[in-house]
Amino acid sequence: MKVSEAIEKRASIRQFLDTPVSDETLWNLLELAARAPSGGNVQPWRVYVVNGGSMTRFREFLSDREPSRPEYEVYPPNLWDPYRTNRFELGEAMYATMGIGREDKPARYAHLARNMDFFGAPAAFFCFVDRKMGEAQWGDLGMFLQTFMLGAMEVGLDTCAQEAWAPQWKNVQEFVGAPAEEMLFCGMAIGERDVDASVNSLRSDRMPLDAWAKFV
């Protein structure tokens, strides 16, 4: 698979098959992702994998746990345009694939809650970063995660990067045994997409190039 094909095909998958993913496959993908750019070769990512038995235990562990106040804002408060419109239109398009109307709040909340089950994915990891790291190192995390997602495409796997785990940081930290100096950034659901799930037909729009790029 060409890199360009992987970029075009990659999507945030929100319904997975339960087909197992081997630890060896995940290990190899993480080693590949570690080749992502990192300023000064700092390599700030710290990853905790849940798969197989640990995934089962994590789901049981989380079933009676309450969320906490997130340690960071996933989106800026009072998001402004065009960013607000981009986010709103994506949400409307996603719910439309499942036939969930804007007035059906219970169904919308139920779908959002599926984040906490990794949308049924059989494997996942949590990405942490040292609390003393700055904005530049958070940028490194994004490049690491994208590299992993594109590598997954090559071996027939799909993913969903999930900052939705931010309110669960205390529970995740306790389960994986991350030290106090590490901060949860996001989760990553990993598995094979359910091609029959309507939500996976979603293709997010992108703004035209001339709206955000200028050739000087």
Image (cartoon, helix red, strand yellow):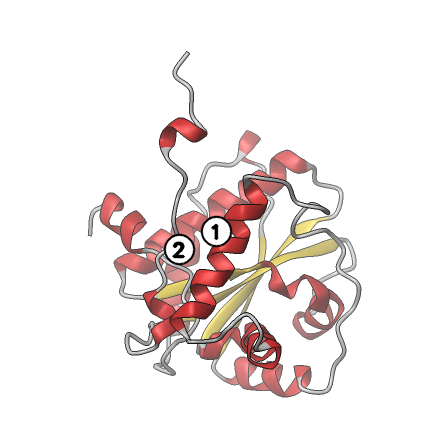
**Residue kind at label 2, given as amino acid type:** Met
Residue at numbered disc 1: 145
In the rendering, at what x and y percent does residue 48 appear? 58, 64
In the image, 178 versus 124, the foreground residue is 124
Please indicate, yes or no, whether residue 160 appears anywhere in the rendered image: no
Find the residue positioned furthest to the left.
1
Residue found at x 37% / y 75%:
21
Q: Using the image as rendered, state which of residue 93 and residue 65 is in the foreground.
A: 93
Element on which disc 2 rests: helix
Write down the residue under mark 2: 149
Q: Left or right of 114: which side holds 80?
A: right
Looking at this view, name the residue that lies furthest to the front: 103
Residue type at mark 1: give it.
Leu
Q: Nearer the viewer, residue 34 or 216?
A: 216
**Where residue 186 sits in the image (x, y, percent)?**
60, 58
Q: Between 179 and 131, which is closer to the camera in this rendering? A: 131
* Residue shown at the point (32%, 76%) measured from the top left: 194
* Drawn side of residue 135 relative to residue 208, left or right: right
Q: What residue appears at the point 40 percent right and 66 percent down from the top-left corner?
A: 13
- Of helix, strand and loop, which one carries label 1? helix
Q: Residue furthest top?
A: 216
Residue 163 visible? yes
Q: Specify few, some or many for label 1: CA neighbours under 10 Å numbering under 14, 14-19, or 20 or more.
A: many
Q: On the picture, is 182 further left or further right than 27?
A: right
Q: Which numbered circle lies on residue 55? A: none
Identify the residue shown where x is 58% and y is 46%: 84
Label 2 environment density (alpha carbons within 10 Å; few <14, some 14–19, many ≥20): many
Using the rendered view, name the quadrant where residue 56 is placed: bottom right
